[in-house]
Amino acid sequence: MRTHYCGELNETNINELVNLCGWVHSHRNLSKILFLNMRDWSGIVQITFLKKDKKLFQQAKKLKNEFCIKISGIVKKRNLKNENKLIKTGSIEIIAKKLTIINVSEPIPIDNHTTNSEDIFLKYRYLALRKSELFKKLKIRSQTVLLIHKFMQSNKFIQIETPILTKVTPEGARNYLIPSRIHKKKFYALSQSPQLFKQLLMISGIDKYYQITKCFRDEDLRSDRQPEFSQVDIEAAFVNEEKIQKIVENLISFIWLKIKNVTFNKIKKISFKKAMKNYGTDKPDLRNPMKLFDLKDILKEIKYIDVIKKNAQSTEKIRIAAICIPNGIVLKENKIKTLKKESEKKYGCYELITILVNEKNSLVNYDLNNSLNINKQIISKIIKKVNAKPKDLIIIFIGVTKIVNNVLNRFKTKIGKKLNLINPEIFYPIWITDFPMFKKEKNGKFCCLHHPFTQPKCSNIEQMKSEPDKIISKSYDLVINGYEIAGGSVRNHNFEVQKIIFNLIGMSEKEQLKKFGFFLEAFKYGTPIHAGIALGLDRIIMLLTNSSSIRDTIAFPKTTSAICPMTDSPNYISKILKKEICS
RNA sequence: GGUGCGGUAGUUCAGAUGGUUAGAAUACCGGCCUGUCACGCCGGGGGUCACGGGUUCGAAACCCGUCCGCACCGCCA
């Protein structure tokens, strides 16, 4: 059938008779000579048809873009002036001797020379995948998966598959539900994570487990979220958080070294609390040089209390923080105003002050359309605090802590991109640790920030009960360039602690038994200390391929409304099917 | 559930403030061309302006609703 791939031919093949299979990438008919760019998954090579071979030439004239063809021909070196430096095989060409049209093609609904709209790209995904940019990303995905298996197996982890069809648990992300035909009115859930199974494997004495598996979550989507996604799931017995973190660091370093030829230094760790203080987010992009500075001390004499009283609820904490934009003078006043308006509209941020620093390191200009009375002394204190240099712009927010954090983080991300402060070539990983165990919901109830199987740092059961919102958990996230790449924790191995956590999140004894009875029972039979983590494979590929959407890393992804435009799923089912399930 | 942007030829897009027959590029069809390489030149066909309603003498444009795509908020233990 085929002797070579198009893109792999070179001058060592000169004068060889080769057989190639692939698609017509483009064609150029010059009446007495006809050129074809022929493509397969390896690349492109030029095929040349000469008029003196009359029959063959007539046949070649019929060729159109995307016809599937087979070519036999002789590899020839091109004249120097005819070389094409834009393609890898540009110094040679194939003089066609035989052409077989395997299949004709209608004009394809994808433009090979420009970006297509996402709906067309998804509807005709099989054609979109013919584009080399998309195919290359899948290739990197394949290579990465191999590296992960190699690394994990050489570190003595064994791969075990856990069920996709599992038990429905209303906690956490919504489940995709599968009706059971045999058991009327009962449902399976598609696994949103192998969490419980991998912990049970630890109880089984499987010392080191890993798996690359699909997970399913029925939640609204984003550019970095798909309803089904792949997770590198890891768990080990008799280890602490340092051990798991070390394994992940080595794994990530291995992947980045092999795929990107990038070496990581030792990955720093910061606590959740510190991350919120310094960056306003638990997913900081550390390529961005801007940080948050607390100004509460400096501005404590200022009458901001009125502002707070007016807008905040009595229980909400207030934060005054600033970012300093290097050379922020280049930002047009309009830009700042737009950002401010956006923030007010979206997040209801209460007060914003901008200060521009002049050559003498003092204030040039600030807008104060508020009642705050900031004098020159205070301004110079602020300038010192945020390390502002001449021509820098300082932006100060006053408001509810959560919103101030949110807005300033978005501000610095947006401005960082606009002023090219973020180097897209760099990868900056960081561990975020010590997340709070619980967060208080609007209805006053506690829920777990991570998941209820995470071990609290506090071992004092009485303290846990009295001040649950102050408990820190043994959890850790790996963040690279602002993306949460992995999340894990040391798990509870103590039956009593596990039950207290369930109690604290308002789960009755009865519910506990009904939902997690099998799991709690297992705890009675000598549960080892264990810890683990899960890495988002799709997001890792997204970073490795510099993609802006997770869809680019998946062969057949879904749209943001969880639809597959190609197969038209989800779809309605027939009455007969319905009857089989429901009756 | 909410906010914003968008939906015009097979494809990618342009169509100020409503006004003759809705344009360009590319793809497609026909012709010319021996070194092109996203070949070039000449000619041609191709539109339910997402869908439904409304305002108007007149709507691709304005208004309302629906559907779809993208980004974001809520959500994602």
Image: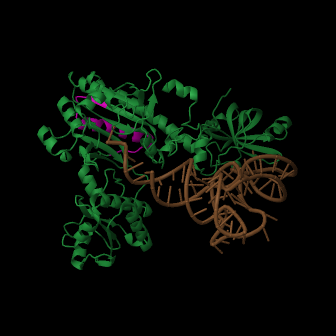
Chain colours: A green, B brown
Decide whether residue A80 is among the magenta residues. no
Using the image as rendered, state which of residue A248 and residue A191 is in the foreground.
Answer: A191
Residue A170, visible in the rendered structure? yes
What x and y, as percent, mark residue A78?
70, 44
Using the image as rendered, state which of residue A484 and residue A17 is in the foreground.
Answer: A484
**The N terminus of chain A - image quarter:** top right
Could you tell me what secondary structure mostly forms the magenta stretch?
Answer: helix
Magenta stretch: give its range: A235-264
What x and y, as percent, mark residue A6?
64, 36
Q: How many marks?
A: 0
Using the image as rendered, state which of residue A446 and residue A26 is in the foreground.
Answer: A446
Q: Residue at x 15, y 41 (%)?
A: A465
Residue A289, visible in the rendered structure? no
Decide whether residue A250 is among the magenta residues. yes
Q: Is residue A86 depicted above or below A136 in this figure?
A: below
Quarter of the image where one finds residue A174: top left
Q: Residue at x 44, y 37 (%)?
A: A229
Q: Residue at x 40, y 45 (%)?
A: A262
Quarter of the image where one finds residue A233: top left
